Amino acid sequence: MATLLFPGLCRLLCLFLAFFCSLPLLGICKESESDRQALLCLKSGLSAPAGALTSWSNVSMEFCNWHGITCGVMSPRRVIALDLESQGISGSIRPCIANLTWLARLQLSNNSFGGGVPSELGLLSRLTNLNLSMNTLEGTIPPQLSACFQLQVLGLWKNSLSGEIPASLSQCKRLQEINLGKNKLQGSIPHAFGNLPELRILDLASNTLTGNIPPSLGSFRYLTYVDLGINALGGVIPELRNDFRISSTITA
């Protein structure tokens, strides 16, 4: 009866309901599209052998099926891991990678990534594993990484990074592994590293570090491996709580 009396009103009501119900879907699409565009942006700065990034196509909407991508199971599907280890990829890590706001694991080791470590990685608040080892990265370690409070593994081994080790990394209280060996890092070992309660592995070998080994290294509860070799460190190796392997070159 209402349809016969107020046909215009009914059509308007139907349009309103259709629009209102579509809002959640629009939000889901927007979030997923943001991840897809971030991946395409990252790819635009890279060169890769045939097959490595072929599936990363602008015509493909199913980015969760792209090579090296892992998405969460909940809707909307968001990228939680990016694993492109040993793919022969070269180029730079573009700042737009920070738009992958649900990213927890970034594994890009054993490639030919150059340029610097983007400071925008510090925006990835869910990041737990960052491995950029065995590349040709230059510049300094961005102190912005200290904003990754969930970070457990920091791997920057075998690059050409220079400058000092940011003491602010000690703010990442969940760090279990720090591997910065085989770079060109200078300065001293941050004393604040003694405030990392869960640290198990510390590898700073083959740099140009100076100063004394911090006594705070002896306070770690879970530390099982330390390598400080091929540096210019002085002082005394502190007595440690656990049995573990330590390698170091003491100059004084």
Image: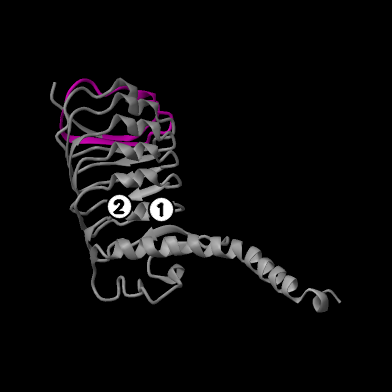
Label count reads 2
Tag shown at residue 51: none
In this rendering, the answer to whether 110 lies above or below 22 is above
> Which stretch is magenta?
218-246
Residue located 37% across and 60% down the image:
38
In this rendering, the answer to whether 161 lies above or below 110 is above
Image coords of residue 162 (percent x, y): 17, 39
| Residue 217 location, quadrant | top left
Which residue lies under the disc numbered 1? 105
Mark 2 or mark 1, earlier in chain? 2
Determine whether the residue tagged by mark 2 lies in a helix, strand or loop: helix
Please name whichever residue, 128 or 42, is drawn nearer the observer in this view of the structure.
42
Query: Would residue 234 be counted in the magenta stretch?
Result: yes
Task: Report whether 58 appears left or right of 207.
Answer: right
Which residue lies under the disc numbered 2? 95
Query: Would residue 9 be counted in the magenta stretch?
Result: no
Q: Amino acid at mark 1?
A: Arg
Estimate the spatial distance between the alpha carbons at disc 2 and disc 1, rounded to whole Å. 16 Å
Q: Nearer the viewer, mark 2 or mark 1?
A: 2
| Residue 11 location, quadrant | bottom right
